[in-house]
Image: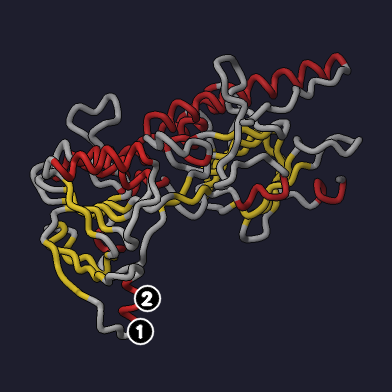
Amino acid sequence: MSENVEEATEHRRLIIAGTGIAGLTAAIYAGRSNNDPLVFEGDEPGGQLTLTTEVDNYPGFPEGISGPDLVNNMKEQAERFGAELDHGIVVDVTGLGDEDGTDGSPFRVEMRDGTVYTCDAFIAASGASARTLGVPGEDELMGYGLSTCATCDGAFFRDEDMLVVGGGDAAMEEANFLTKFADTVYIAHRRDEFRAEDYWIDRIMEKVDEGEVEILWNTELTEIHGTPDEGIDYASLVRHPEGHPKEKFEAGDDGVETFEMDVGAVFYAIGHTPNTGYLDDTGVELDDEGYIITEGGRGANQTATDVPGLFGAGDVVDHHYQQAVTAAGMGSEAALDADDWLEERERADELGIDATPEPAAGDD
């Protein structure tokens, strides 16, 4: 343990990974608690909200606010209360444990550039990255008609035809939500049957019968056309009766049909990947999809993990709501939980007793 500590550039009371809404809210609360947090931006500074041109559902902004502006305001607020923001990318976190080898605090935090820090408590607020397709037009139009969040952006395209890409629960839920605003919602799925639960399939089929939804079976998106100034003009798709049409299209199969659709918005609903790989060496408990399992419940310490001193907040934990406002709430909880944990440990050190809490129960 001593060798790892000696190589550290600096020891901090609290380190936060992520500058999305959860991480920045945690930084604001931690700064106000005099915990001098060091906050690393990571691969996606500002999180997914920076891809949203207009945020209309975050409380306190009756006229809306752009995602980047909201993030920048929160950064300024965090720095005002003493948080230090750094562009670094965390690549590995290791619990150094106590003298008896117990995992957990203090933590060794290694950065991509080789810099090493240690800290007493660590908040993982590194979010989850929406999966994308890599088709032409995707990078240019993300946030300008292309979205990964129907709840966030659907209302901006009222009375437009909209295209949802996916075939699981998320795609069904987003398509159902978008019927509140769209003229017609089209669902493009590369297979001939959905992977969603029967409940959602039944809901969508009711919408099909009502003429609000149209399903494009065995169909994949191949290109999105438009400009950031004008938004999406139309989308190119490919269909094959046996499914997975892009694979067959590349093979030159004669059964392939290519076509175009005039849609005003495209929504990806093909899942998210939680950014938790850097936590592998902590041994923190994750669910089957890689999301952090926290204690939860109704009392204190809800954001604690089974690793002492390690807390989780935002989309790296929440695979259901994934809203800016819920991420903010969880970020504040993580900062408060971390502050309680740090103070309890300090009191225990003064009294010479073991203050290590029971591990989080997690999900059965």
**Is residue 274 left or right of 168 when viewed as pictured?**
right
- Colour convention: secondary structure
Q: Is residue 348 above or below residue 40?
A: above
Q: Residue at image x 73%, y 31%?
A: 308
Rendered-image quadrant of the N terminus: top right
Q: Which residue is farthest right?
A: 100
**Residue 107: image location, x then y, percent:** 73, 41
Q: How many marks do you count on the picture? A: 2
Q: Residue at x 58, y 28 (%)?
A: 303
Q: Say which of 362 and 214 sits in front.
A: 214
Q: What is the number of the mark on residue 247?
A: 2
Q: Residues within 10 Å of mark 1 (few under 14, many from 20)?
A: few
Direction from residue 307 to residue 135 in the image, left or right: left
| x and y, in percent, of residue 134 in the image | 36, 67
Could you tell me residue 146's position as x and y percent?
25, 54
> Which residue is more in the foreground, 148 or 78?
148
Q: Residue at x 18, y 41 (%)?
A: 207
Would you say residue 79 is visible in this rendering?
no
Q: Residue at x 73, y 18 (%)?
A: 344
Crowding around mark 2 (Cα neighbors within 10 Å: few <14, some 14 to 19, many 20+) is few
The amino acid at mark 2 is: Glu
In the displayed structure image, the side of residue 116 where residue 33 appears, left or right: left
Which image quarter is the C terminus in?
Answer: top right
Classify mark 1: helix, strand or loop.
loop
Residue 33: image location, x then y, percent? 57, 21
Whether residue 180 can be seen here: yes
Real-space Cα distance between discs 2 and 1? 6 Å
- On the rendered structure, is 226 left or right of 241? left
- Is the C-beta separation of discs 2 and 1 under 8 Å? yes
Residue under label 1 = 251
- Label 2 SS: helix
Numbered label attached to residue 310: none
